[in-house]
Image (cartoon, helix red, strand yellow):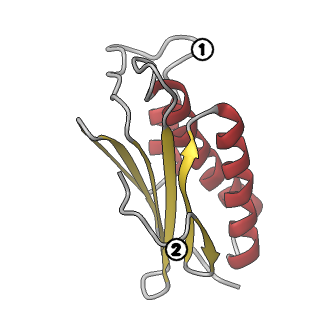
């Protein structure tokens, strides 16, 4: 789980945070749109790069919403914290849940499923996925993120 902050909804030029969001499709969609608005407001990304970042974030949120709490008897939450480092012009986003990790199916992805992690890897400069009994954290990083 991401360390808690004093406010669940934070957005400024260096930080975007949504903590304790219900892990469902509607919330994932809303957070994706809020994140896209944050990128547009504070960064000088071309439309394709911005779309790539938003899609990668969406895949991580969608995975948390769909899979993290499948084996639990009650709904859970997910967190998104993005931090911009102006010194290195890099952006790091962490999506976390407190659910249970579901191992990907071995072999090639199914025709219609299993493309989330490969998409995140293709759309970001670095991806790490940490799993534990306390949940899952997906951390994605992008270099060369410009500010206007």
Q: Which residue occupies the foreground of this view, 44 or 9?
A: 9
Residue at figure coordinates x 55%, y 41% from the top left: 61
Q: Is residue 140 left or right of residue 66?
A: left
Q: Is residue 68 left or right of residue 119?
A: left
Residue at figure coordinates x 56%, y 36% from the top left: 23
Q: Which residue occupies the foreground of this view, 103 or 44?
A: 103
| In the depicted structure, whether residue 120 falls above or below residue 5 | above
Chain-order first, disc 2 or disc 1: 1
Q: Which residue occupies the foreground of this view, 89 or 95?
A: 95
The residue furthest front is 74
| In the depicted structure, whether residue 11 falls above or below residue 123 | below
Residue at figure coordinates x 35%, y 51% from the top left: 1
Q: Secondary structure at mark 2?
A: loop
In the rendered image, which residue does mark 1 sit on? Answer: 112
Q: Which mark is residue 144?
A: 2
**Place of residue 134 in the rendered image (x, y in percent of width and height, measured from the top left):** 27, 41
Q: Which residue occupies the foreground of this view, 80 or 75?
A: 75
The crowding category of the residue bearing disc 2, from other C-alpha atoms within 10 Å (few below 14, some 14 to 19, many at least 20), is few
Residue at figure coordinates x 74%, y 52% from the top left: 33
In terms of image quadrants, where is residue 65? top right
Of labels 2 and 1, the one closer to you: 1
The residue furthest bottom is 87
**Place of residue 81 in the rendered image (x, y in percent of width and height, measured from the top left):** 49, 62
Q: Secondary structure at mark 1?
A: loop
């Amino acid at each position: 789980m991401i360390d808690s902050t004093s406010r669940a909804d934070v957005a400024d030029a260096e930080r975007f945070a949504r903590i304790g969001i219900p892990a469902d499709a509607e919330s994932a969609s809303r957070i994706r749109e809020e994140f896209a608005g944050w990128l547009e407001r504070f960064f000088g990304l071309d439309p394709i790069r911005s779309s790539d970042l938003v899609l990668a974030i969406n895949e991580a949120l969608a995975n948390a919403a769909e899979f993290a709490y499948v084996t639990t008897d009650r709904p859970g939450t997910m967190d998104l914290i993005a931090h911009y480092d102006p010194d290195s012009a890099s952006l790091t986003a962490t999506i976390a849940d407190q659910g249970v990790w579901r191992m990907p199916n071995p072999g090639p992805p199914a025709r219609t499923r299993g493309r989330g992690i490969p998409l995140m890897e293709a759309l970001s400069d670095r991806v790490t996925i940490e799993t534990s009994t306390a949940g899952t954290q997906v951390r994605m990083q992008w270099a060369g993120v410009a500010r206007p």
